Amino acid sequence: MILQHTADGILSGAIIGLGAIGLSFTMKILRFANFSHSELLTWGAYFGLIFVSVATAMGGFGGTFGPLSFGWPLILALVFAAVATSVLALLLHHLIFERLAKVTGHMTMVFASFGVALLLRNAVLLIFGADPIYYSNTLQFAVLLPGNVRVLPDQVFLLALTIVVVIALHLFMTRSRTGIAMRATAESPDLARVSGVNVNNVVRWVWVIGASGAAVAGVLYGLTVQLRPELGFALILPLFAAAILGGAGSLYGAVIGGLIVGLSENLSVMIIPTTYKPAVPFLLILAILYFRPQGLFGEKK
Amino acid sequence: MIGVISYLIFFLILALTFGIAVMGLNLQWGFTGLFNAGVAGFLAVGGYTHAILTGPARDAVFGGFELPFVVGLLGAMLASGLVAIVVGLVTLRLRDEYLAVATFGIAVSIQLVAVNWEYVTGGTLGLIGIPNPSKGLADGPLRQNAIYLGMVVLVAVLAYVGLQRIVQSPWGRVLKAIREDEVAAASLGKNPTRVRLESFVLGCALMGLSGGLYVGFIGFVGATDFLPIITFQIWTMLIVGGSGNMKGALLGAAVVWGVWTGSGFAISKIVAPEWQAQSGALQAVLIGLILVLTLLMRPKGMIGEDVHVSRHAADTT
Amino acid sequence: MTRRLTATDIVAGYRPDLPILHGVSAHLDAGEVVTIIGPNGAGKSTLIKSIAGLVKITSGIVEIDGADRTGTPAHLLAGAGVAYVPQTGNVFTTLTIRENLIVGGAALPKAEALAQIDRIFDQYPMLATKQSEKARVLSGGERQILAIARALLTSPKIILLDEPTAGLSPMAASELFDLVRGLVADGAAVLMVEQNAKAALKMSDRAYVLAEGENRIDGVASDLLENDEIGRIFLGARPEDVT
């Protein structure tokens, strides 16, 4: 049983980790806890749904890939969702958060993010209704792995894609000038400025990367679990736990934090009733803030 | 005419009930700079405690002490206060946004307990049959509500006067000193952590009181009564009223409650029938829009912020 | 003598309603090392931060190479030949030495930035050998060198230094001052804030004395070394007593 929980934990953790990257960076660079970040996962998932529905209606792009439940439409939907969610995030940034940051303190921005979250979540509810939806009705047969572990082919895809995305981000952050500038800005925006970095541009990149990660996480969640309007809201605490655990501003921190959260949640059902599982991320938050507030990879201020 | 008065009474009962919670939040944010994102949780603790203490015995559920109304309210305050002590000891050392995340998590956890701990909270069914003292004192809903309104007004006035006293007392002055220059206050022997905790606990106790009054009026309590949107509503009331004084807190409660119920009413009249089921979502979108627009157009954002900006002015990294 | 920088009647502060500088003026010519000294709270750091674009200037003019650059964002100033090295937090500790320099070249096109990095590595071999290590492993003196090297990547014409010798041993401080003197050999100019007033005056061309956000005295550094007025400005101590 423990191995199955571990497998489930890793898969859940992958989604949380991808989603937490953007949250971690906005917390560090923009210095506010963005309670609306989780809604970017929801919107990413539903943007994906729109694309898949349209593509399928237009006559599909060939069938599904082997044991997976999807074909080209979903792959392209991932790209579409990332782009669309990035546009959404940039809009929110320019129309709301950037303006507020200039005139108010960061707690007003936290409150505004509550309002934005409310807006985004209920907009999805209005447009798509409250019922759960799925990308496809294809039935999948679980693959049996050593140790009596069952995973769906889609879940294997999830893990593979997460690894690819994380590696790509790692390369971006360490090899490209923009990525290095981003890390520099995360450490010290002023020092970055006087070095010649256009911090406003870096901030835009942060939103795009964060939103893209969230969109991919959202689509993967929709793929392997289900789509529903509360998708993001249910993940707020796990996302914050991952970002705080990993240390705000750290890519690896967010991903590893996500894995830890996912594993803790899934392994915890061996000790506490399943219905209390959602409280586990919260307990992790309390623990890390008590023992090591800067997180695993963060810097002590 | 009676209809209007009847509605007005109903309206005022809820507005003032929330107003008490807003005053508690004002103490925490406006006077102490604590961003409590878990308001709904403390209302829930108070509401459930009151229900358990005053309600009738029920099968397979804890409680049913059938204690007097006032005892229920006091119990509500005590319970919320106790939870606040525990929460505060763990979280009050945290920086603003981490406190927001932690308190948000508290509310979510309390909600989880409310849904799952069936023995105490009745689970998803909740607790019903909570006695309303006005029912024994008069006939007919109009008179009963008028009496309940009287009780709520009394409690609100007591809370208001009490808070004003506290804020102007030596303790209140220490609070002000800490807000303006914590380091100096600490060097003078004041204990900022302890004062903050006391302010947090008192604020939460008021929220518990509010929860108790709410539950006593409605007559039942369920897990869906204290969702995060309540936290958002209470905060909005505080912002609209201008966090800085208690009068503003009460005024904000009335205004925002008015907008909330008004928009609900307008939506039910204007919107086509097939959308009615979504009216809650429509309301939320509307209120969210109004709030965000207000924040954008108000040049200085939340008033309480000014006081705290000075603390962080040196932080320009 | 090319005038590199002119700051006229600068009023600036971290909050618009609380100015720290109340109308300060200074200028800098090519090839000069100019020091700013003064008691704590005089606004010395604020002055160079406002020239660098980090602190908002409420009124006054900053001209660089004859062009009005008041209010220009910091990153554009960096691209226009202004380099600033803060007193603390002046290297990216989470980045490697090489990455620090890459950031330093942010305002340059990629190929040119890489070429400049090679140039810096030639000039400061210590940095080259440690280039893949994170900056946080460097000693205080080494960090200072990296901080300045980062700023030099763009071959700046105006170099602003905030207490470059703070926390350094007298030997390391002396070496750093030698380095600073070398910076102006090619026509650049250095404007630095120093607490180490005596030592700084000895190696500078000119100096400004600020107090309470205003100019008090300025002139040739060697003259100021003998000026008793300065001692009074520093709360009654004589210049020789100020270390």
Image: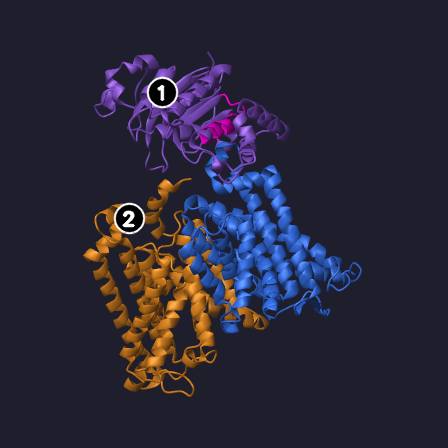
Residue to which mark 1 is pinned: C200
Asked if residue B27 is positioned above or below residue C71 in the image, the reply reads below
Q: Colour of chain B?
A: orange
Q: Colour of chain C?
A: purple
Amino acid type, callout 2 = Glu
Q: Nearer the viewer, residue A185 or C130?
A: C130
> Is residue B287 found left or right of A15 in the rendered image?
left
Main SS of the magenta part reads: helix
Element marked by disc 1: helix
Q: Position of residue A203 (x, y in %)?
A: 53, 43
Q: Colour of chain A?
A: blue
Q: Residue at point 37% right, 69% down?
A: B43
Categorize mark 1 by other alpha carbons within 10 Å: few (<14), some (14-19), many (20+).
Answer: many
Tell me the subunit letter for badge 2.
B
Q: Which residues are magenta?
A: C143-157
Q: Residue at point 47% right, 52% down?
A: A295
Residue A174 placement: quadrant: top right
Look at the numbered discs 1 and 2 and tell me whether their residues touch, using CB distance below 8 Å.
no
Q: Mark on residue B182?
A: 2
